[in-house]
Amino acid sequence: MRDDICTIPVSEVFEVKDGCPICRMYNTVEERIIDYIMGDAMMEPDVRIETNKTGFCLNHYDKMLSHRGRLQLALMLETHIKSVEDDIFGKKFFNSSNKKAQKAKDLSNSCFICNKIEWGISRMIDTVYRCYENERDFRELFNTQPQFCLKHFELLISGADKRKMPHYLKEFTDSLTSITGEYAKSLYNDISKYCSMYDYRNNRPDADWGNSKDSVERTIDFLG
């Protein structure tokens, strides 16, 4: 397929046929944003203004803690906690208890990295639709994926429409539904096999577990 600055990350994600491609896309975007925020971006005034205002979720605080550069995180926390102190707990006119509570709630539910991931993924998903509509090679990559998780099945199918794919919408939704449905069926077979192996009649050293040993983890990944 024809590569450009938009399609290169998407095509690379779909070339690896192992697990859900949108999960891989999410993980790639998340890793790049964490590298960015823990690198030179930490000293960029516009970034610091935004991180002071939004902060991060617990998940991304944990990931930044395990990342190199603990000092960078400490410097961001220094100005962020000062912003929290001033905005929520500072003595201001018309800053009632209800307003303080709402500010604390809004801050607890905001995350700089989550916002950036959502922004990046939404544009990459639009690239998926555009490439499926216009690129035969990409359609082949998409149609031969082994699976999509339930969350990203919903994301892809709910966002597809005739405006984005005037010629290939039905093929796209049919292929996506077939791939996801077949994978769900295989998970059911594997986890049923796993459960049956605990029957006393199958409790033998040479019992054949087939592909069922990791079926619990794979089913959770698919559903979650």
Image: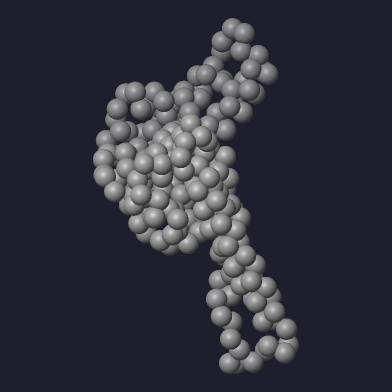
- For image coordinates 27% across by 35% down, the residue present is 40
Q: Residue at x 29, y 27 (%)?
A: 44
Identify the residue at horizontal 47%, vertical 51% (top origin): 23
Q: Is residue 76 left or right of residue 197?
A: left
Quadrant hosting residue 122:
top left
Residue drawn at x 30%, y 33% as measured from the top left: 41
Task: Identify the colour scheme used.
Answer: one colour
Q: Which is nearer the eye, 39 or 170?
A: 170
Q: Position of residue 224 (x, y in %)?
A: 59, 53
Residue situated in front as seen by the camera: 117 or 168: 168
Q: Residue furthest top?
A: 93
Q: In this view, which residue lies farthest toward the front?
A: 167
Residue 103 on image: x %, y %: 59, 22
Q: Is residue 33 above or below residue 179?
A: above
Give the image location of residue 194, x and y in percent.
Answer: 64, 76
Compared to residue 137, the image places residue 112 above or below, namely: above
Residue 113 image position (x, y, % from top left)? 44, 37
Q: Is residue 34 visible?
A: no
Q: Is residue 1 visible from the viewing direction of this image?
A: yes
* In the foreground, 209 or 142: 142
In this view of the protein, which residue sits in the foreground, 132 or 148?
Answer: 132
Q: Is residue 98 above or below residue 93?
A: below
Q: With 105 as the anchor, is 148 left or right in this view? A: left
Above or below, 218 relative to 35: below
Figure label count: 0
